[in-house]
Amino acid sequence: MTRNTMATTCGTATLRPVRPGRDADLLHRWITHPRSKFWGALGATAEQIHGEYSRVAASADEEAWLLELDGTAVALVETYSPASSPLAGHLEIQDGDIGMHVLVAPPSGDPVPGLTDAVFAAVLRWLVDVRGATRVLVEPDVANAAVHHKNALAGFRDVPGLEDTELGSKHARIQVCTAERFRSSRLAGCASVDRGRSGAHHLVSAGQRAEHELIAKALREFVHERLLVATELPEPAEGRWRRYRVDFGPRELRFRAIPHALEHLSIDPGSVTAVDGAPCHLVDLVAGAAPELGISPNFLPVYLEELQATLAGRARVLGAGRPSSAELAAGSGGGASSSERRGQAHHLQFVEAAMTEGHPGFLANAGRGGMSEADLTAWAPELGRPTRLTWLAARREMCVRGAVADLEQQEFLEAQMGPELAERFGAVLRARGLEPSGYVPLPVHPWQWENRVTTTFATNLLRGDLVYLGEGTDLYRPQQSLRTFFNQSRPEQAYVKTAVAVRNMGFLRGLSPAYMGDTPAVNDWLADTVGADPTVRARNIRLIREVSTVGFTGDVYHRSVESGLADPSGHQKMLSALFRESPIPFLAEDTVAVTLAAVLHVDAAGVPLAGEWIERSGVGAAAWVHALLEVYLYPVIRALVHHDTVFMPHGENVILELRDGLPVGSFLKDLGEEVAVVNVHRELPEQIIRIQADHGDIDDAQRALSVQTDVLDGVLRHLAALLDDRDLLPEEEFWRICRDYVAEQDSGGLPLLAQTFRHSCLNRLQLRNPTSMVNLGDQNSSLLYAGDMPNPLWSPEREFSAVRE
């Protein structure tokens, strides 16, 4: 790609200078079209247009460009120096300001969905990431409502007092978009420049704030897991705030916090100080407390590296800027943009990219070992930059494949590739003398291709077992799970989950071919049981299935394991992919989809997104929480009690459907790897027997832990504290709503309301072994416990009532 070329959701965009002699007739047709009335030149002659753009070409302060999509001109772009324009008389011009005009070509045939989004995104991406603009200035006519709407989606905001300004012959609405605001806008994912330029590193500008936040999180979660002991100091309370002390290794720290149920402390990051007066640095604190935290000497460097990568990642995001909670909530139901599939897709990804916390419990949650700064700038989910996937053709006989029962796999895969790539698939293979019917398409993470496939599978590439097809035509956005991508170009098409040999949160993020053969069958069984449950369907709860899979096994690493010459390793998990349904086609016209992780999101000003949704819904916090339980907690209990099935319902694995901010449905995902049947006596199809627990000692208390640990402690603990801290809903009321809701459900005799439950601890797992936290084949036996935790759902009154009945 050249510096003026970008990938967009509508094809490859290229900006080239206007050549007046060659382009004047085309520009004349565009500018004099009735749709271009706001350019004020409907009566201009071709000679006048030629003369105007000849003047611009000779100007030192103005430039004119044609934007072409896949070689076809679709827009005129004018850039100018604001300091030399009439704008200079109305607002203070800053270094790095660039002025912009954009004219999208009047339609000449059937409308192209998303064309204007792609054009706006490409122009702004070029100005910000290539031309180095820190602010982009525009001055559209006050009556040009269509452009105002598009500008808002791109991150433009009115300059106060200049919403109706006389500017030459027009009344203009002067607006500004900062580079940071564009990068966190809804349109940012519609265009991407060459990933070879690393983004600015923000450790200096945002590192201190990032470290304060992570130290507070370390204190909160390590106290919660009883690795550290927080002692309340005998000092006067400041409202609900209390003062505490903690021995963090050899150092004594003090801070203020609000205490909550489940031994959770909401800690003020700015209040943490060391008694010795020396600065606090997270890695030094953890290294000094390694023995108390249970980190062995051989694993300490690995854990500290993941911790520092998490710190750098948070600083990178804080420095790049984030949308406010009000902006994230603005499209949560209703309005023209959210009634269109593309608008719904924009909103889903707009919120997805804003999720900066990572896992709410794990401290070191963004290690991404092996990725460079340029790699992270390109593919870190929280930066939300779009990319094109690399595609290979893999020899069919060397692949494990699967598809759900109602899918014609070949037709499906051709649809996922798109017509241009599907045609290239056959052409490339035939050019090498290979028969296309003997191969299957295999999407690959670009990082995996560049860093592992070209070297680790060189022999397979040499002999044609794997054939390089190049980049696909669609633009994808990375999701929170790092290796999963959403199709931004065609949102109705499937997610693609890839293998990537990057270690993150205790796992190499590979994808095992051993699971690819039966994953669709697992999804079929779940769809026929949990998904078909009439009470689940009645609550608008759906499973988004993993419908097609492929895993390459024709390499020397698989053969060495099969022959007993090598032990299983990550080398057998480097070339697989699965396709997961998109939620977009299943949404009602007046709803949007958002990740469940967003219910815990707080913006830079401390405003929770959940609070904005509650206000938008108009139903009050208590009713909003009850609505959330109906689409989140209900399926977890129902699946466990009636189908002996447990999911992994953390924030990234659930998608909510919202109408005007109110939860009205949900989607459960990541089913093939993270679902289990916890009843050894339940009959399952032979093909999916791997998901059945292989031991019979799972008692009712252990079964109930899948709700108490994953939902109560893993998600609702944080939400209860968040709503209480912001005076949105008292914590006692939150847990009463949850208690009453669980009591109303059929618990199958499970002790969900018991006085205590075993305290399963996530960070203890990672601290024990940051390279392999659990045995995925037997996760239950890998867990670590820290005694019993008081259950916030228990109440003596309800227990007494139950005994009397």
Image: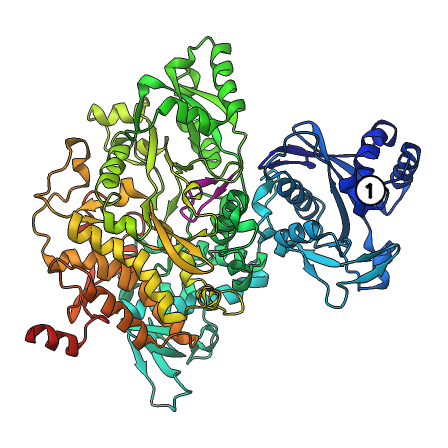
User: Vertical placement of 328 versus 622: above or below?
Assistant: above
Q: Residue 138: horizontal and vertical position, in percent?
A: 75, 53
Q: Nearest the camera: 430 or 432?
A: 430
Q: Height in image: 568 above or below 671? A: above
Residue type at tag 1:
Glu
Q: State the SS at label 1.
A: strand
Q: Residue 234: name its quadrant.
A: bottom left
Of the 4 image quadrants, the one containing the N terminus is: top right
Identity of the residue drawn at 19% across and 66% down: 743
Scheme of image coloration: rainbow
Residue pictured at 36% horizontal, 53% vertical:
665
Decide: is 174 above or below 345. below
Give percent across and percent down for residue 612: 48, 66
The residue positioned 68% from the left and 37% from the top of the image is 3
Could you tell me which residue is drawn at 35 percent across and 77 percent down? 730
| Numbered circles on residues, count | 1
Residue 544 left/right relative to 491:
left
Q: Is residue 178 magenta?
A: no
Magenta segment: 476-486
User: Furthest residue to the top?
Assistant: 433
Left or right, 198 with reference to 354: right
The quadrant of the picture occupied by the C terminus is bottom left
Q: Quadrant of residue 251?
A: bottom left
Q: Position of residue 446 (x, y in %)?
A: 48, 34
Can residue 508 be seen at all in this image of the molecule?
yes
Give how far across and how far down residue 475 sits, in percent.
53, 36
- Residue 288 visible to the viewer: no
Q: Which residue has dot 1 on it?
A: 63
Residue 478 within the segment the image draws in magenta: yes
- Using the image as rendered, state which of residue 263 and residue 15 is in the foreground: 15
- Check disc 1: other Cα within 10 Å, few if <14, some if 14-19, many if 20+: some
